[in-house]
Image: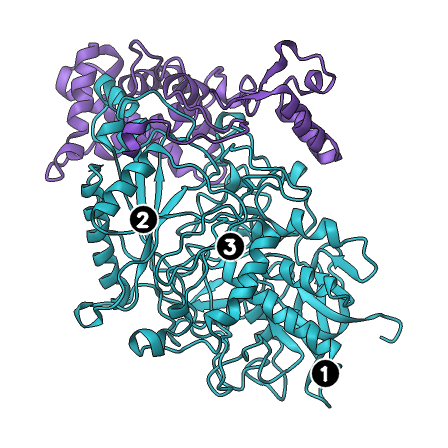
Amino acid sequence: MDGKLIGRRKALKYFGFLSASAAGAEFLANWLPGSREALAGSAPGGLVAITGASQSEVAASDKGSVPQFFKPEEFSTVEMLTEIIIPTDDQPGAKEAKVADYIDFVVFSAAEFEPKLQKEWIDGLGLVNELSSKKYGKSFPGISPSQREDLLTEMSGPEHDPKLQHRGFAFYRLLKAMTLEAFFTSKVGLMDFLEYKGLAFRTEFPGCTHPEHQA
Amino acid sequence: MCSQPIYDVIVVGSGAAGGIACQVLVTAGLKVLCLEAGRRIESGRDFHTHSFPYNWTYRGHGKPGQYGKLPQGMAWKIEEWTDHLYTIPDEDPYALAPGAKFTWTRMRVLGGRTNCWGRECNRFGPLDFKPRSLQDGWGEDWPITYDEVAPYYDQVEQFIGVAGDDQGVYNSPPSKRLQPAFNLRCGEWLLKKGAEKLGIKVRQTSLAVLSQPLHDRPACHYCGGCNWGCMVGARYGSLDSVFPHLEGRPNFTVRTNAAVHTLLMDSATGKARGVAYIDAENKQEYEAYGKAVVLAASNIESIRILLNSRNRNSPTGLANSSGTLGRYLSEHVAFTGIRGFFPQLAGRPTTNDDGPGMSSIFIPRYNYGHQDKKTYLRGWRFNISTGCGMGPGPGASLPGFGTAYKKKIKELYPAAFHISGYGEGLAFDWNYVEIDPDGLRDRLGIPQVRFHTNAEYPHAFAMRDEMYGQMEEILKASGAEMIPYKKGVPYPLGSVTHEAGGARMGNDARASVLDKWNRCHDVPNLLVADAACFVSHPEKCTTHTIMALAWRACDHLAEEFRQGNV
C-alpha cells in the first residue's frame, strides 16, 4: 500500500489536531492543499492524497527569465555548457530544469557577498572561448557539438587521472558543481528525474518490503 | 530590590537541560523563573519543515556568501529553512586562539537546540561512568555510577517519548521500551547482515520521535524534515513538550530575550542570590533574585557566565577555586565518512526512505578489552544512512558528465549509503575556553569567549585510522561498493554539536567544579545542569545524558528545598 494515502478518518483526526491551534491551522492552510475541503468533509473518494509542500509553488528564481548577469552570448554559452553536463535524453535535463537561468540568478546575486564568483564565471567563460579558439579557430558557440564535448572532456582530465593538469579544470569543476546543484534542487531534477518521493505525509513507514534484502 | 519577587529557583536556559529543569522543579511545586536569552517562537509558524529546495529563493542555501564563512559542521544547519533560528557566526563572532578551531552552534530561541536536535537517545553504560577504574586507567571517573543515573534515564524516556527496542548490548543499555521501533530500510538490512557476519551487533536506534501518539503529541508523519524543526511536535523539544504545559501555572514564569551575563553573589554567605541580565530587545539591564540558580545555558554559555562573574573573591571566575573551569572540553572523534552504493539496490524503483528522519539502526561500540593491542583508548559507534535522499546520491561524485554520467546517477540514487562514526573524545586540560583577553564582546556587549581547542591529537588520528578500516570491513561484508575517498582530519570540537565538559563533576573539589549533584563545590546553591558537567565523552550521543543528569540534579535540589536546606 502506498503510505502517502491516508485514510479519510485518520486524516480528519490529524487535521483536527492541527487545526485546534492557530499555528496548526495556518500550517495546514499553507502546506496541505485541499485541507480545507477535507476538513469540510467534502473530499472525494474517501481517501485524501496528501503530499508535502505545494509542489507547484516554485520560487521565482526557479522559473527562468531574461538573464540578469550574463550577456546574451555568455548566457548561450552557459546554456550549452550546462546542457553538456546534464543533457536531455529520454529524461529531462539541464535545459528543462532551466539550469542556466538559475546559475545566472545565483551569479547575479553574488554581487553583494561573494563577488569573486562573478569573476570566476567571467574568467571561466573567457577561458573556454580562448581554449576553443586555440584548438578550433572559433569561439565556443561557433564550434560543433562534438567539438564542445571534446573540449570539456579535456578540461575534465584531472578528474579521471589526478596526475593530469589542465588550466580549464578549476572552471570545469565550478561549472559541474553549480550545474548539479541547480539541477538536483529543481523540481524537474529532484521530482521528475530522480523521482524523490519523500517530504510527504504518511501514517506509517513500512521500510524495506523485500524479503530478499532481509534474509 | 525588595519590590521584586524572590523565586525559589532561577533556571538559565530553556533547551535540553533547561527544559527538563523547569519540568522537574515546577512539578515539584517550586516557584521558578526561566530566563531564555532568545526570543519566543512557535513551531507551526517558525519551522518551515515541509518546503522543498525549489520553494526557496536560493534553493535553501541562501544568497551566495550570505552566511559568511561557516565552520565545519555548520553549513547543513544554517540554511534558508533555519537561518532565522541559528546565530550566524560572522554576525555575532566568538574568538579563536591562533591555530584553534571550534564550531559553536547557538540557537537563541525558546527551546534552544532541542528545536533542531539529532533526537537519538543513547544511555551511557556502566563503563562510561568509570573509564579510569573500569577501562584503562586514563582520565577521571565520574563521581556517579550507571545505577545511580538509570532511574533518571527511565524518567526522561517516559517523559519525552522514545521509540526503540529493548535489546541492549554490552555497555549500551537498552532504553525502557515505550513505543515500537521504526522499520528498517533496504540498505539497513544489508548493512545489518554484513556486520552480523563479522560478529558485530547492530541495534535499532532509540529516537525521541513518536511512533504512536503520546498525550497531546501526534505520531511522526515521516516527512523526514526533522533537522528543520518539527511543526507538529512529534519529536521531543522543550518548546512544545514543556513550556505550553507549565506556562499558566502560578509558580512558573518564562522571560525570553533575557541574556544572563553574571551571577549576583551574597558576599556574606558566599551564596548566589540571583542573576543579572540584559534584555535583548530594549538593551536594558535587569536583575532577578532566587534562592538557588540552575545554569542550563549549554556548556559554553554556562561557563561564560561563570567566567564573567569573577569578583574579588574569585578572580579567575566564579566557582573556579580548582582552576579547572573552562577546561577539559571534549567532543566526539568524528571525520568525513565513506559513501557508496549497494549493487543489489542499483536501478530499483525509488521509494520514500525518509522515515523518522534518521537511520533505524546503528552499530554500537563493540571493541572492548584488548587494550594492550590498541593504539588508542576506548571505542566508537558507527552511524548509517541509506536510501533515496533529497540529493543526487553517490553517482554525482563520480568523474565525468553527459548522458552516461546522468544515467549512473539515476541508477545509484536508490542504492546510496553513507557511513560515519563517533569515537570517544578525550578530555584534556589544554582544550579550554576563556573570556577573550582582547576584549571581544557579543552583540549585547557581554564579554565573549575565546577557544583554545584542538581536535587533531594523536589518539584521534589513531582511532580514526582504525575506524576507517572497520567501516571498510563492514561494507565489504555487506556487499557494498565504496566511492574512492580520502581520509579526513578529525573535525574541530563542537562540530558534532556534542561539545561537553568545562565544569566537570568530581568528588575532589581541587580538581573539579561540580559535586555529584551538579552543585558548584564553591557555591552550594548554584548548579550547572548542562553538558558542562561531563567528565568523559563516550561514543554515545550526549543529549539523553544531559537530560537525565539535569533531572537527577533538579530532583535532588527539590528534595533539598523540602528538607529546608536551601
Q: Looking at the image, is mark 3 or mark 2 nearer the viewer?
A: 3
Looking at the picture, tell me which residue is in the foreground, B275 or A33.
A33
Label disc, if present, on residue B565 of the rendered structure? 1
In which chain is the residue bearing label 3? B
Q: Which chain is purple?
A: A
Q: Residue at x 47, y 20 (%)?
A: A2
Residue type of the residue flagged with mark 1 = Asn
Q: Residue at x 64, y 64 (%)?
A: B445
Ranked by sequence position, the earlier of labels 1 and 2 is 2
Residue type of the residue flagged with mark 3 = Lys
Whole-number angstrom distance, CA of label 3 to CA of label 2: 27 Å
Instruction: Tell me the colour chain B is drawn in.
Output: cyan
| Residue B308 horizontal side relative to residue B29, left or right | left
**Does the residue at mark 1 contact the one at mark 2 (Cβ under 8 Å)?**
no
**Does the residue at mark 1 contact the one at mark 3 (Cβ under 8 Å)?**
no
Residue corresponding to mark 2: B420
Q: Label 1: how many residues lie within 10 Å, few (<14), some (14-19) or many (20+)?
A: few
* Coloring basis for residues: by chain
